[in-house]
Amino acid sequence: MDDLIEEQIRYYRQRAAEYDATTRPEDDPFAAISAEARDALRRLAPVEHAIELGAGTGAFTAVVAEIARRVTCVDAAPEMLELNRAKVPAADVERVVADVFVWRPTAPAALVVFTFLLSHVPAERFVAFWDGVRTMLAPRGRVFLMDETRHGLWREERAPESGSETAYRQLADGRRFRIVKVLWDPDELSERLAQLGWEARLVRRDPFFWGTARPTSRRPPRRARRGATIASRRNAAPACRDAGMR
Ligand SMILES: C[S@@+](CC[C@H](N)C(=O)[O-])C[C@H]1O[C@@H](n2cnc3c(N)ncnc32)[C@H](O)[C@@H]1O
């Protein structure tokens, strides 16, 4: 699995320069849906400190910087963060090149944001990921997340030899990489998060979903930590060449 995570990070490093044009072209058919999600994020204002995991080129960083006095953006791809800095030059945005599975903040934040990152978290790291996010949150803090759902509008090319969660991605120059792609149905995600001690409020607008999640306790129930994810069992799909592909 570590090899796959490393390959995924290499992919995003190489994809950085073409990421915006391929995910959000000028004629983006999902622009209105994305605007709805940004408005939902805006409604979480005001925030003192926000952490954005997998911030990428900054598709949501401007909104995070708008609602928070101070922002910490984390991404494993320095190329992504350079583009992020160019897009959101605000002085109160700190950028950290780090693996979100390892990185921990020096102080917890009122808001942790991750858009189109959760689908790149493998099932076997799902619990550890959310436990990590919990440690990043201040008391009464919350998460805002957005991702692709199981929509059926396109199908990614899968790499079944590397496990059911693995998809192939191709760059403009033809190079291919394997990445993790776990599509969540928001109801099933809410159910799974409830087992881990989170209360999620998610809305679905295919091909996406978004919303907030709050810990219901400081420590997750032990029983839930052993469960397999629903998404890992039901993940289906083959290669999107679509604007929705993150
Ligand atoms: C699909 S992009 C999403 C970017 C941005 N949040 C957006 O909405 O466009 C996923 C981002 O997560 C980053 N990423 C993937 N795995 C990571 C990891 N383990 N640690 C840190 N960043 C990671 C990638 O470099 C990439 O910038």
Image (spheres, rainbow, N blue to C red):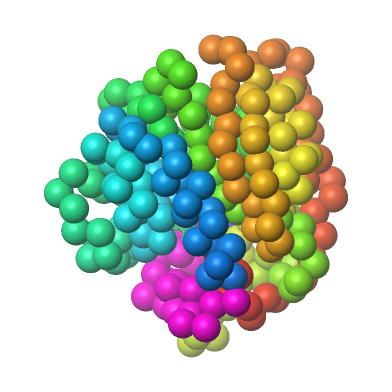
- Whether residue 96 can be seen here: no
Quadrant where the C terminus is found in the figure: bottom right
Report if residue 20 lies within the magenta region. yes
Q: Is residue 240 left or right of residue 83?
A: right
The main secondary structure of the magenta stretch is helix
- Whether residue 95 can be seen here: yes
Identify the residue at image location x=69%, y=63%.
207
Q: Quadrant for residue 163, please give it.
A: bottom right
Identify the residue at image location x=30%, y=23%.
107
Q: Nearer the viewer, residue 103 or 135?
A: 135
Identify the residue at image location x=65%, y=26%.
199
* Picture coordinates of residue 63, whole percent (x, y): 36, 52
Q: Is residue 141 left or right of residue 128?
A: left
Q: Which span of residues is magenta-colored?
A: 9-29
* Picture coordinates of residue 222, whole percent (x, y): 70, 13
Identify the residue at image location x=60%, y=77%.
29
* Picture coordinates of residue 241, whole percent (x, y): 64, 80
Which residue ends up furthest to the left in the rendered image?
A: 91
Q: Nearer the viewer, residue 190 or 73?
A: 190
Q: Quadrant for residue 46, please give it.
A: top left
